[in-house]
Image (cartoon, rainbow, N blue to C red):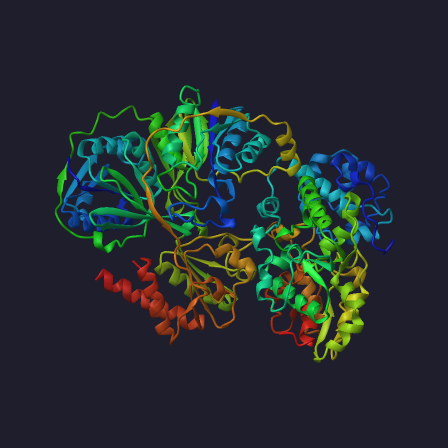
């Protein structure tokens, strides 16, 4: 059983995201990259499957951001092989471009299961997993919270609103968009991580980015902010009316 | 009762980060007297209280202890360590070794603690706030708070603000008041600002050796860049770590907690304490300032210097003081502990405070204000007791806004 | 090649989802402005009965088969792809939902058409369709000019009003012959997993009526529950409330409880201690009621009122009942 996990780095919102001077992209100088949260869950789920079934887990990432850190952490957690894909691209690609690159890289390799986070905070053009499945012509299920292996298939739980979930059986090979692993991503003690970073082997592979442009962004902008609460006044009935108005505006009173 | 002096900390660097396999040797002089288990405020809820845990480890039953709840319930109050007749390093060595073993085995960890450690790794503070905003609290201080990298000259006092006093709103207020007091006393001081990172007490006691080493290496490097006569700090945990642990790993600095620093300047301070605070106050001896480093008198001296203030003592005070339950990173294990404990330590403590008929509970540790504020609400003592850091009371008497 | 606007209908637990009507409302507006037709792709089993509700559309393409009873991206995606290749609509609107997101990405790749996600605004500007999407957790918005060829857009639920889409009418119903022979289904729906009985997962509830110590005792909790029921939400609380046993632990919001990102967080009698704020500051709309004008909660709420929650809860309950009553009429 061969599992591929695809990860990407996204801007860390703790450090803030600023728009650059062109107004069409985020300012790379202000950005610090970290691993996309649901990709961390995808890795965790892959490792849990590995623990249950002795599967082989490989982690792939395109070269943006502190990818080495993430790939070494994956090795420290138990991944069997990690691959950094060099594209020569200066800025993070759109999901369509990334999916096409991964499709080329993974085609011909015999992965039974490809896991990736179902969404990332900087997604604008769909989710990587679904796009990849489309290019590879394999089945896709997104918002997965549990994966069990059966004969030639995966039995997965797909999340729906209100706490509902659908149990689906998917023929392998397939791509799954992970929402949450069955347990929170495990902790790697820093001493172990530092050790792995000194001795680990991160494979590298070249890939040519495909032709074609993403849907262009006309402009980026920030929403308006206020400082502190807007205070409502009047009698309780008047306050209630104002609150109900706010709710109606947002379609919360339907 | 054993030796009530603050215990010597681990001498040998190897002992600083013991592995669980080292524990039987380190604890070979344990006479199984049970004073530790009897003194432990969490002893009743541990699967294996300290005495039993030490015995089981001596018998090689590592797995049972590591998988129990024991590793996560020690609040590092040091009541056991100051009383142990063999002077064994229970919270300083046994428990970090247990925690380290849990992490090394990749066993699931309490998520709050995991997040705190991950945040410290990424951002240098357990709250997960940007290091660039570490000095934001100074913007509304109303007095100058110089940043040493901008001053470009030596200073008398380097004030290490630490994580909670920098980022946590209740504590930010206290930091601002201290800045005002320092200015009023004409102290030549500066802070590190965004270069400051967690001193590492929590991380060390949580058994995260690699993270602690990373922090201490970096902190020593930063501190060696600048010239200052002494370090001032308000966080007793960090104070103790800087005082006793950093020297073992190459970082020897003169460090003082604010209670020491201000009592040394009592001659200057006293005349500024103009306003009378007619309040009955009781003081909580925090573990790191009390049992671990022996500063029982200075805080009381500061309180007595405030005109009109009446100082009362709780039933457990000084060496017998009751921990608030947040030490050794257990501040991130509140959910875990609460599920197992009927009567939380902080709740018990505020009830002891109220029993003295005091109106104010005075503290000198950044963990205390929010923990005790919370406990006051839960025990329904809101009308009866307020929690104030000694700095706040001094500032009030100095009529600092 | 027609330039129609399509809406992919969504159903859940036997009913058409609200998002369907939200998309219809916006779709109808755009179709009218562009002078084109609005069509609905309705896939499932026993779905013909829904066509009466789809009056906002001009055409409904129905594919009704037993094996399509429950959604799988595989089956629905193949059908949608075939439909797009044949009809080549200008714009296909989907919900940014569990179903919609899967379809959006899969079909974008398999049909080789561009797609945009997280859309909160869609307008015509000088004949061009402009979509605005939110990214980075809503911290940044991106304005995108949609290409003039077939483009898929996934819309955030609640971004467009549903009323505009609830129009009765008689759309033309077509069962397209293009529905391909089903490929051996690679994804099979096995069963629904219901949420565990008893308690609610407050991290998944869109509206939270959250109470603090100001609620004073357990007897007052039902008032909050009534309000929560009206708004389709749940009651949550700050730690003191849970500690007192007035709400179960699963309802606790804050540092040692849950972190919630609800659409509405109504903070009643909650002071806003940092440990609590940590668990709810990500909520989209925070409205706070507290008798203390200095309560820190007002620093994190977008709207607030210094008032007694025991006056505001009944007033708000009544006001909402009035509004919901008049709509049903």
Q: Is residue B370 visible?
A: yes
Q: Nearer the viewer, residue C162 or B349?
A: C162
Residue appearing at x 60%, y 69% in the figure: B142
Q: Which image quadrant: the N terminus of chain B?
A: bottom right
Dividing the picture into quarters, in which one does residue B376 lie? bottom right
Q: B183 or C111, which lies in front?
A: B183
**Residue C23 placement, left or right of B168:** left
Q: Position of residue B161 (x, y in %)?
A: 67, 58
Is C216 situated left or right of C34 in this image?
Answer: right
Considering only vertical position in the picture, is C137 above or below A84?
below
Quadrant containing the C terminus of chain B is bottom right
Residue, far front: B152
Left/right of residue C83 with respect to residue B129 in the rendered view? left
What residue is at 60 percent from the left and 51 percent from the top?
A: B339
Q: Residue at x 21, y 31 (%)?
A: C85
Q: Quick check: can you spot residue A138?
A: no
Is B257 above or below relative to A199?
Answer: below
Quadrant housing residue B348 = bottom right
How far across and down, in percent of the image, does residue C300 sit? Answer: 48, 62
- Residue B87 image point, x, y percent: 85, 48
Q: Is residue C255 left or right of residue B24?
A: left
The answer to which of C220 and A51 lies nearer the viewer is A51
């Amino acid at each position: 059983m061969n599992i591929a996990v695809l990860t990407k780095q996204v801007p860390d919102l703790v450090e803030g995201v600023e728009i650059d001077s062109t107004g069409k992209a985020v300012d790379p100088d202000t950005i610090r990259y970290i691993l996309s949260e649901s990709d961390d869950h995808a890795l965790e789920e892959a490792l849990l499957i590995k623990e249950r079934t002795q599967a082989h887990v490989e982690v792939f990432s395109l070269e943006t951001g502190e990818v080495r850190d993430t790939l070494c952490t994956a090795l420290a957690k138990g991944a069997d092989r990690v691959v950094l894909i060099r594209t020569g691209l200066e800025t993070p690609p759109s999901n369509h471009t990334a999916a096409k690159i991964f499709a080329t890289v993974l085609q011909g390799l015999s992965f039974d299961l490809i896991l990736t986070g179902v969404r990332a905070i900087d997604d604008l053009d769909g989710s990587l997993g679904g796009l990849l499945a489309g290019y590879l012509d394999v089945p896709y299920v997104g918002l997965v919270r549990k994966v069990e292996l059966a004969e030639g298939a995966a039995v997965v739980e797909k999340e729906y609103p209100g706490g509902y979930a659908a149990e689906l059986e998917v023929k392998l090979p397939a791509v799954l968009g992970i929402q949450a692993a069955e347990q929170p991503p495990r902790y790697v003690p820093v001493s172990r991580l530092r050790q792995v970073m000194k001795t680990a082997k991160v494979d590298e592979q070249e890939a040519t980015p495909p032709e074609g442009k993403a849907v262009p962004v006309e402009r980026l902008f920030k929403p308006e902010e206020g400082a502190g609460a807007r205070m409502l006044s009047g009698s309780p009935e008047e306050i209630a009316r104002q609150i109900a108005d706010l709710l109606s505006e947002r379609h919360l009173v339907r | 009762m054993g030796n009530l002096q603050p215990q010597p900390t681990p001498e040998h660097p190897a002992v600083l980060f013991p592995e669980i396999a080292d524990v039987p040797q380190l604890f070979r002089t344990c006479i199984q007297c049970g004073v530790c288990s009897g003194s432990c405020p969490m002893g009743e809820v541990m699967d294996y209280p300290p005495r039993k845990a030490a015995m089981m480890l001596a018998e090689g039953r590592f797995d049972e202890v590591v998988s129990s709840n024991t590793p996560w319930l020690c609040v590092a109050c040091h009541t056991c360590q100051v009383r142990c007749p063999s002077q064994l390093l229970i919270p300083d060595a046994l428990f970090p070794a247990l925690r380290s073993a849990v992490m090394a085995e990749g066993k699931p960890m309490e998520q709050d603690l995991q997040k705190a450690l991950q945040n410290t790794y990424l951002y240098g503070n357990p709250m997960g706030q940007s290091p660039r905003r570490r000095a934001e609290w100074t913007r509304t201080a109303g007095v100058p708070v110089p940043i040493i990298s901008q001053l470009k000259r030596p200073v008398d006092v380097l004030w290490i603000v630490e994580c909670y006093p920098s980022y946590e709103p209740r504590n930010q207020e206290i930091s601002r008041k201290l800045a005002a007091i320092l200015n009023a006393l004409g102290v030549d001081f500066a802070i590190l600002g965004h270069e400051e990172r967690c001193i590492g007490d929590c991380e060390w006691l949580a058994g995260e050796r690699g993270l602690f080493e990373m922090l201490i290496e970096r902190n020593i490097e930063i501190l060696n860049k600048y010239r200052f006569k002494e370090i001032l700090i308000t966080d007793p945990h960090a104070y103790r770590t800087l005082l006793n642990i950093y020297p073992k790993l190459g970082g020897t600095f003169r460090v003082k907690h604010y209670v020491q620093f201000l009592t040394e300047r009592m001659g200057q301070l006293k005349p500024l304490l103009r306003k009378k605070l007619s309040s009955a106050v009781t003081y909580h001896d925090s573990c790191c300032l009390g049992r671990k480093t022996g500063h029982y008198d200075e805080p009381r001296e500061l309180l007595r210097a405030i005109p009109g203030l009446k100082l009362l003592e709780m039933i457990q005070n000084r060496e017998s003081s009751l921990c608030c339950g947040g030490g050794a990173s257990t501040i991130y294990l509140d959910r875990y502990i609460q599920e197992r404990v009927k009567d939380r330590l902080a709740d018990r403590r505020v009830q002891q405070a109220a029993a003295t008929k005091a109106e104010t509970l005075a503290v000198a540790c950044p963990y205390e204000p929010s923990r005790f504020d919370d406990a006051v609400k839960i025990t329904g003592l809101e009308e009866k007791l307020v929690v104030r850091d000694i700095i706040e009371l001094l500032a009030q008497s100095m009529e600092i806004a | 090649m027609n330039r129609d606007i399509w809406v992919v209908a969504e159903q859940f637990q036997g009913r058409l989802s609200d998002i369907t009507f939200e998309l219809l409302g916006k779709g109808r507006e755009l179709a009218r402005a562009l002078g084109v037709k609005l069509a609905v792709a309705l896939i499932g089993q026993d779905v013909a009965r829904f066509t009466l509700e789809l009056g906002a559309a001009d055409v409904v393409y129905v594919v009704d088969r037993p094996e399509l009873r429950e959604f799988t991206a595989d089956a629905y995606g193949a059908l949608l792809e075939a439909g797009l290749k044949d009809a080549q609509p200008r714009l296909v609107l989907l919900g940014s939902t569990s179903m919609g997101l899967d379809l959006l990405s899969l079909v974008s790749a398999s049909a080789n058409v561009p797609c945009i996600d997280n859309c909160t605004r869609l307008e015509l500007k000088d004949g061009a369709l402009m979509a605005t999407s939110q990214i980075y957790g809503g911290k940044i918005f991106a304005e995108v000019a949609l290409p003039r060829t077939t483009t898929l857009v996934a819309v955030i639920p609640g971004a467009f009003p549903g009323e505009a889409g609830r129009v009765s009418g008689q759309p033309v119903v077509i069962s397209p012959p293009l529905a391909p022979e089903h490929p051996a289904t690679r994804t099979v729906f096995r069963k629904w997993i219901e949420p565990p009985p008893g308690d609610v997962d407050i991290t998944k509830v869109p509206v939270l009526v959250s109470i603090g110590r100001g609620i004073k005792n357990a007897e007052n909790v039902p008032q909050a529950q009534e309000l929560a029921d009206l708004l389709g939400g749940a009651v949550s609380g700050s730690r003191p409330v849970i500690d007192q046993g007035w709400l179960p632990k699963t309802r606790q919001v804050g540092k040692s409880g849950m972190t919630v990102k609800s659409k509405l967080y109504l903070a009643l009698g909650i002071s806003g201690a940092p440990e609590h704020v940590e668990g709810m500051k990500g909520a989209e709309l925070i409205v706070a009621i507290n008798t203390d004008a200095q309560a820190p909660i007002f620093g994190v709420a977008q709207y607030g009122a210094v008032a007694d929650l025991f006056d505001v809860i009944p007033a708000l309950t009544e006001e909402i009942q009035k509004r919901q009553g008049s709509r049903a009429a």
